[in-house]
Image (cartoon, rainbow, N blue to C red):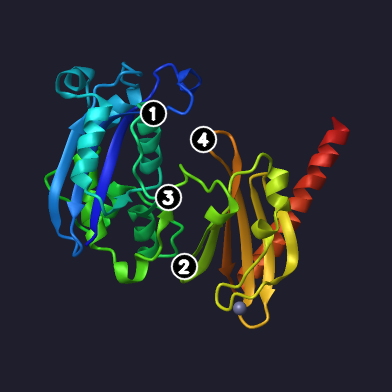
Amino acid sequence: MKNYIVFDLEWNQSIEGKEHSIEHFPFEIIEIGAVKLDERRNMVSEFHGLITPQVYVELHRKILEVTHMDMETLKREGRLFPEVIKEFLEWCGPDCRFCTWGAMDLTELQRNMEYYQVEIPFERPLYYLDIQKLYALQKGNGKERVSLDRAVEELELLEERPFHRALDDAYYTGKVMQEIDLETWGKYLSIDYYWIPGRRAEEIYLEFPTYAKYVSRGFETKEEILADKVVTDMICQKCHRMLRKKMQWFSVNQKQYFCLAVCPEHGFVRGKIRIKKTEDGRLYGVKTMKLVDENAAQDVFKKKEEQREKRRENRIRKVHR
Ligand SMILES: [Zn+2]
């Protein structure tokens, strides 16, 4: 029996700006709020913990404005992070599926655990449900991400509870989650990228109804990633054929690459590689392979044409400077 843990964090940051924050610790968690839903998605329990910050001890203006939290309360009612996280994990139980609104919270949670040297007991890879993404998928094409406030409004779930405190936001995220058709959309698991594969055997390949996703291990350089055959191979998720490319990989901005392949049986497959950076500075690639129609295939051609045009303009500009 698996419980769903829907949680939300509030965090503080350096008031002197990003460049004054500690490396790998840009955000210090000051509040954890969570609701537990059972298998049938009944809300069965709540968790709330305030944390007295130890690193960024003045509240950033943004946090004050959004959460209306004050340092006095955090000092008076807060406890130390290791104590609160221990209690939180015990409350979660051993077998749970984390759910969050958006993709940041699990990463920041683990960064804080690492900083405070709390052992991270999560499965690797760590899969979770991004309710913001699932809501976008259920509503439309999955591309338009809306704020929690807006989703709550659209679903008419508003209650006498404010927004932007961790427990309230977790509660509302739980309410939105209850409205998601998990039979259809629950398959779209998200992967938390705090941990990434260390070797080939750990690399991740996932198939979703409309696309497949692959996460490479860490590399030293981008060139090594793009020279790796497993990274650049294109596969049809329907028949698992290795595909011939109609258009080789090309970059649009140094961090994103596209290609177009074709399956003789299932048609065009669009490839996309995003280059990302790990906590310790290694690079890895996240590749998606998606079956697309003729129009979307044409868009890939256009994208490449645009890139070529941009590069040409840049060259001209350089010459005239
Ligand atoms: Zn195929």
> Which amino acid is tagged 4?
Glu
Horizontal side of 12 relative to 31 (left or right) equals right
Q: Position of residue 208 (x, y in %)?
A: 46, 67
Q: Do the residues under discs 3 and 4 have CB atoms within 8 angstroms?
A: no
The residue that label 1 is drawn on is 27
> Which amino acid is tagged 2?
Phe
Q: Which image quarter: residue 142?
A: bottom left
Q: Residues within 10 Å of mark 3 (few under 14, many from 20)?
A: few
> Which amino acid is tagged 1?
Phe
Q: Residue at x 18, y 65 (%)?
A: 40
> Disc number at residue 208?
2
> Which amino acid is tagged 3?
Arg
Horizontal side of 24 relative to 159 (left or right) equals right
Q: Indicate the secondary structure of the residue bearing disc 2.
A: loop
Q: Position of residue 317 (x, y in %)?
A: 82, 37
The residue that label 4 is drawn on is 279
Q: Do the residues under discs 2 and 1 have CB atoms within 8 angstroms?
A: no
Q: Residues within 10 Å of mark 4 (few under 14, many from 20)?
A: few
Q: Nearer the viewer, residue 53 or 296?
A: 53
> Disc number at residue 124?
3
The quarter of the rendering in which ligand 1 is drawn is: bottom right
Q: How many marks?
A: 4
Instruction: Compute the Cα span from label 4 to label 1.
Output: 14 Å
